[in-house]
């Protein structure tokens, strides 16, 4: 009974924090719709053409509101049913090869170099295999979509002493592509710990920042974490994302 109460409490606190951030994002398009409608209702349009333009802008703002609401619904599904997570030993080498198969054509079509370096076959992580591959494919695909040239590199840093696997994604995407994701992860870092949970969701609906927020939730539900270690600066153009998961070896 105490554990059930704790889980419910943690879940409620996560949803409250996420709702506050989503509500903040909704204020801008809502204010836009209200302002444009007031111009039309007060006969402040100089011509029918200008009135139609204001109606178009109000419609665009309403569509943005709808998209944000869809994102809120999608990310909240992570918290709905923790029983859907199937935690098991997952071979890193096989997972990396699967990511390569699903992303190499995307990189080739954009003339980008994709360098995926799988570890030895006897290294495994404890994770949900479907979620792990989806997260990695989405992160690599996001890097590809953000870049016009350069290299994307997926490697590992395996710490057998602490039994932690660090999966490292490095790329040279533009610094401005990180503004919204950085803000989302910064907000997420200050919320209470979340519950173990699952629920597969349509991640394609999410903005880059909310996508990382969703991945952070998924990884924490698997006793892992996602960190934005480096973003591009005047000194270094490199971006670095790091996933950490429990590591096991075949003999374990």
Image (cartoon, grey):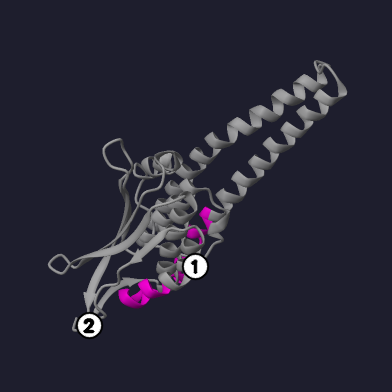
Residues shaded magenta: 75-98
Q: CA distance from mark 1 to mark 2?
A: 32 Å
Question: Dot 1 corresponds to which residue?
Answer: 105
x and y percentages locating residue 219 in the rendered image: 37, 60
Q: Residues within 10 Å of mark 1 (few under 14, many from 20)?
A: few
**Residue furthest front in the image:** 111
Q: Which picture quadrant has residue 161?
A: bottom left
Magenta: main secondary structure equals helix
Q: Residues within 10 Å of mark 2 (few under 14, many from 20)?
A: few
Question: Dot 2 corresponds to which residue?
Answer: 250
Evaluate whether residue 252 shows in this view. Answer: yes
x and y percentages locating residue 29 in the rendered image: 63, 33
Q: Which picture quadrant has residue 40?
A: top right
- Magenta residue check for 95: yes
Tell me the residue at 50%/57% (across/down): 110
Q: Is residue 46 above or below residue 51?
A: above
SS class, disc 1: helix
Which callout, 1 or 2, points to the residue nearer the camera?
1
| Screen quadrant of the C terminus | bottom left
SS class, disc 2: loop
Which of the two residues, 182 or 86, is positioned nearer the viewer here? 182
């Amino acid at each position: 009974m105490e554990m059930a109460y704790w889980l419910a409490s943690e879940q409620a606190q996560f949803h409250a924090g996420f709702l506050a951030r989503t509500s903040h994002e909704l204020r801008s398009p809502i204010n836009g719709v209200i302002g444009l409608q007031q111009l039309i209702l007060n006969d402040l349009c100089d011509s029918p053409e200008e009135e139609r333009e204001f109606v178009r802008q109000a419609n665009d703002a309403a569509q943005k509101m709808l998209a944000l609401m869809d994102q809120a619904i999608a990310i909240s599904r992570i918290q709905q049913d923790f029983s859907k997570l199937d935690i098991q030993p997952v071979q890193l080498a096989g997972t990396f090869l699967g990511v390569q198969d699903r992303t190499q054509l995307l990189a080739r079509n954009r003339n980008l170099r994709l360098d995926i370096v799988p570890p030895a076959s006897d290294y495994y992580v404890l994770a949900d295999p479907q979620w792990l591959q989806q997260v990695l494919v989405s992160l690599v695909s996001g890097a590809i979509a953000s870049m016009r040239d350069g290299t994307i590199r997926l490697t590992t840093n395996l710490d057998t002493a602490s039994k932690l696997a660090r999966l490292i994604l490095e790329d040279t995407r533009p610094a401005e592509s990180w503004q919204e994701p950085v803000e989302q992860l910064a907000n997420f870092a200050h919320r209470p710990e979340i519950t173990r949970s699952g629920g597969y969701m349509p991640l394609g609906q999410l903005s880059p920042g909310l996508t990382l927020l969703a991945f952070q939730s998924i990884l924490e539900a698997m006793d892992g974490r996602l960190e934005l270690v480096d973003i591009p600066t005047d000194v270094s153009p490199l971006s670095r994302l790091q996933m950490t998961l429990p590591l096991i070896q075949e003999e374990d």
